[in-house]
């Protein structure tokens, strides 16, 4: 069959008419589909950044919003350690699956070995444009005889050794120790919650690290970080700790 493409025929007229009518509608629906795709991506981005945006502005309160609603946080179940703990999605968690004994299972462990099961990191972006550097929350445990015997007593030297308090977390009594430290323009505040469970000493503790604000150039225009807000969120995380 010999088709002459440059010849106008009744069929070519019909095809041209159909294309003339259909193309605007096709373009319209493609545009709507593209717009919906972009909106979906934006919605997902807003969801991911919602926690961070909740912090911006002086009106933020740790008693409202995402950081106060522990029910929507990520729950980390550590079957090796026999516990679970929840945390905001934008905080980084590192589970130690090697289970190698270490003296870093709790702060100032007096060189007694144990296992650090999980490390949670709160980045400086949690309180931007402030002197807040980072915070670390760890969960560790040791069945070492000396570690167990010294679990609920103040550290002999260094580490959390200030007056202790007793708090109940999900039915388990914990003894809380507090300590402050300063070094090389940095400030560290450590809180250590300890409990005896299943023949082991468990330590759930966090350290807040900040810089001395007078050491920063004035051009940075940094503000003092809101320690109360950060401590409140950290204590909420500790409050989700439970044994499996």
Image: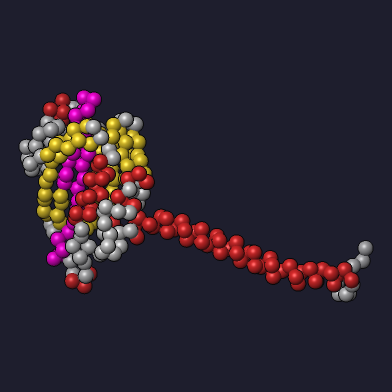
Figure label count: 0
- Above or below, 20 against 55 in this view is below
Q: Residue at x 18, y 27 (%)?
A: 144
Q: Is residue 197 visible?
A: yes
Q: Does the magenta segment cover residue 77?
A: no
Residue projecting furthest to the front: 64
- Above or below, 147 against 65 in this view is above
The C terminus is located in which quarter?
Answer: top left
| Residue 58 locus on image (x, y percent) | 26, 64
Q: Residue at x 6, y 37 (%)?
A: 156
| Residue 8 locus on image (x, y percent) | 88, 75
Residue 164 in which image quadrant: top left
| Residue 134 locus on image (x, y percent) | 24, 54
Q: Is residue 66 found left or right of 111 in the rendered image?
A: right
Q: Which one is in front, 188 or 47?
A: 47
Q: Residue at x 13, y 33 (%)?
A: 152
Residue 46 in which image quadrant: bottom left
Q: Does the magenta segment cover residue 205?
A: yes
Which residues are drawn in magenta? Answer: 190-215
- Above or below, 119 against 143 in this view is below
């Amino acid at each position: 069959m010999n088709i002459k493409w440059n010849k106008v025929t009744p069929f070519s007229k019909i095809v041209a008419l159909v294309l003339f009518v259909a193309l605007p509608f096709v373009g319209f629906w493609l545009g709507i589909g593209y717009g919906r795709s972009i909106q979906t991506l934006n919605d997902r981005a807003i969801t991911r950044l919602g926690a961070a945006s909740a912090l911006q502005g002086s009106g933020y309160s740790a008693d409202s919003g995402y950081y106060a609603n522990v029910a929507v946080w990520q729950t980390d179940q550590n079957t090796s350690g026999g516990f679970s703990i929840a945390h905001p999605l934008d905080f980084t968690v590192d589970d130690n699956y090697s289970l190698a004994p270490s003296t870093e299972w709790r702060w100032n462990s007096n060189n007694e070995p144990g296992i650090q099961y999980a490390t949670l990191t709160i980045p400086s972006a949690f309180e931007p444009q402030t002197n807040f550097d980072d915070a670390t929350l760890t969960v560790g445990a040791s069945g070492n005889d000396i570690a167990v015997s010294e679990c609920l007593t103040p550290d002999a030297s260094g580490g959390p050794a200030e007056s202790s308090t007793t708090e109940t977390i999900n039915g388990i009594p914990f003894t809380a120790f507090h300590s402050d430290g300063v070094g090389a323009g940095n400030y560290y505040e450590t809180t250590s919650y300890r409990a005896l469970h299943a023949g082991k000493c468990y330590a759930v503790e966090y350290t807040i690290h900040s810089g001395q604000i007078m050491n920063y150039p004035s051009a940075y225009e940094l503000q003092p970080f809101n320690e109360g807000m950060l401590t409140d969120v950290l204590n909420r995380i500790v409050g989700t700790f439970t044994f499996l």
